[in-house]
Image: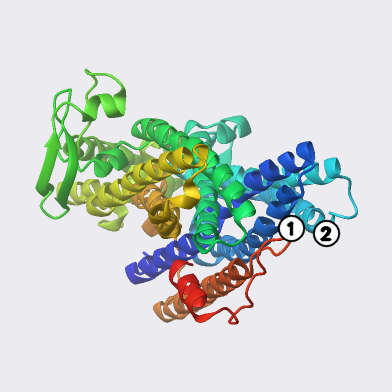
Amino acid sequence: MIDGTVVALSRWQFAATALYHFLFVPLTLGMTFMLAAMETIYVTTGRAIYKQMVEFWGKLFMINFALGVATGLTMEFEFGTNWSFYSGFVGDIFGAPLAIEGLMAFFMESTFIGLMVFGWKRLSKIQHLLVTYLVALGSNLSALWILVANGFMQDPQGAHFNPVTMRMELTSLPDLIFSADAQAKFVHTSIAGYVTAAIFVAGVSAIYMHQKRHLELARRSFRMAALFGVLATAGVITLGDALGYVGAHAQPSKLAAMEAMWTTEPAPAAFNVIAWPSQSEHRNLFEVRVPYVLTPLLTHTMTQTVPGIDQIVAENAKRIEHGIPAVAALKVLSSDPTNAAALAQFDAHQRDLGYGFLVKRYADDVTQATPADIQKAAWDSIPNVFTVFWAFRTMVALGLLMLAFFVLATIFSIRDDVQHQRWFLRLAPWMIPVPWIACEMGWITAEIGRQPWTVFGMLPTWMSASSHSVGYMVFSLAGFVLLYSSFIAVEMYLMVKFIRQGPSEHGDTPAPAFGGAPAATGAMLRKEV
């Protein structure tokens, strides 16, 4: 048994690392294709303003990319340092997509980024455009392989547990890559990055238009961002629904937590618009409901029953009972891998092995687990309903807010009067943090909703951590928070610096030096940036 405090601190450290890292990822994913779109127009029209746009937004992209790499590399090492049992248990499967990501996607992306930045005078227009598209392809392939690995944690496909080696082993690479969860999550996450980039470009462009600086670049960038964003936001909402549909089949406990649905209701069930879930009392202390909406929303039918938490707990209790013989057989096989009786017993119960592990938290000898132990373990299979419910609703609400913003932005851009909508130009910079918050809420929903598992249905989180001391974990967590906070500070400083400077070609008003702007302009920049 690993110290519960060590497990909690390991989870906090990985959560902090992942959430910090994901502050850089969406902008990288989205900016690559926006840069490619801008450069495509430059190559086909020959208009120098579009090259200026690529160079300016590309400079901001490079700042974000460099710091994103620094945070991402560190995060991968944590699997070996803080989650050694997990790494040993699923290393054969989890390591494959990470290795492919490093060898194929990351090196591809990094190599072509160098050509994109320094190749303007060394490559032809068509060659440079091809390089920019390869950068975009590489960054999105990186996301694909990372999300394939995460998709296995959410819905383990293409693998089986070998009781002789005591490890999970890869059986089908296509099943791993093309699992429904991995593919839906990849598309959803990538398009969320496009939304993030669109709002970033629109917000910064709005600042320039509000200040009457770099107007040609700002108007064209804003128009592209508006069109890019309205399509991407509609896509991310639609595909989010598809991801929820896939998740409903793979992880019914997560779905029930997202909807704070404590009891199974006859179809069509009511939808909780808002609620105040209580994990200890197994009910909502307060809720506002809309009748008949939940069932068609989740199942796309009016007759299919959506299982509530009470039903899921009862089913999981049976799976725990069925998994106990598998755990007991595994203990025999650990000392005698050829024991025929133990192998037969394991084969009969291996589907519920992970659920058998759950009760080890309360009975080291699972064969001695009491009905009360099994019931507590069954309730452990339900994630924190309050956190998942509100993280999910925050993400959805912000998604709808961004859709409304982009619809207005598109209308104003088509009418070519966005520069006259002063209230909208003041609003746009305040929208810049919104997609980042929505992305973070999405990851909280996905990862907290998967608990108590690192690999859903197979390996509980409390078994997965390394056996460090509490002091080591406190020191390590504090170090990561300080280091990553410094990365965020560096990114903000550099972004603000180069946004203030802005582009200064093609007759635009010269950009003020960092710290050398007139007092009024400097105050507005500090307020809006």
Quadrant showing the N terminus: bottom left
The span from disc 1 to disc 2 (Cα, nearest Å) is 21 Å
Residue 464 has which mark? none
283 left or right, relative to 359: left
Q: Is residue 62 visible?
A: yes
Q: Is residue 273 left or right of residue 498?
A: left
Please name the residue shown 67% across and 48% down the image: 35
**Could you tell me residue 452's position as x and y percent?**
34, 51
SS at circle 1: loop
Q: Position of residue 258 (x, y in %)?
A: 27, 43
Residue 400, percent from left and from top: 35, 42
Q: In this view, does 313 lie to the left or right of 13?
A: left
- Label 1 sits on residue: 506
Q: Which residue is drawn at 53% across and 77% down?
A: 486
Residue 96 can be seen in this image: no
Q: Is mark 2 on a helix, strand or loop?
A: helix
Q: Between 137 and 336, which is closer to the camera in this rendering?
A: 137
In the picture of the structure, the residue carrying the numbered disc 2 is 118
Q: Do the residues labelled 1 and 2 touch (CB within 8 Å)?
A: no
* Between 483 and 403, the one nearer to me in the picture: 403
How many marks on residues? 2
Q: What type is the residue that disc 1 sits on? A: His
Q: Residue 277, position in %: x, y?
A: 16, 50
Residue 241 as seen in the image, left or right of residue 34: left
Crowd around label 2: few <14 · some 14–19 · many ≥20 (10 Å): few
Front residue (pair 224, 474):
224
**Disc 2 residue type (three-letter):** Phe
Query: Residue visible at 42% across and 35% down?
Result: 243
Mark with earlier residue (1, 2): 2
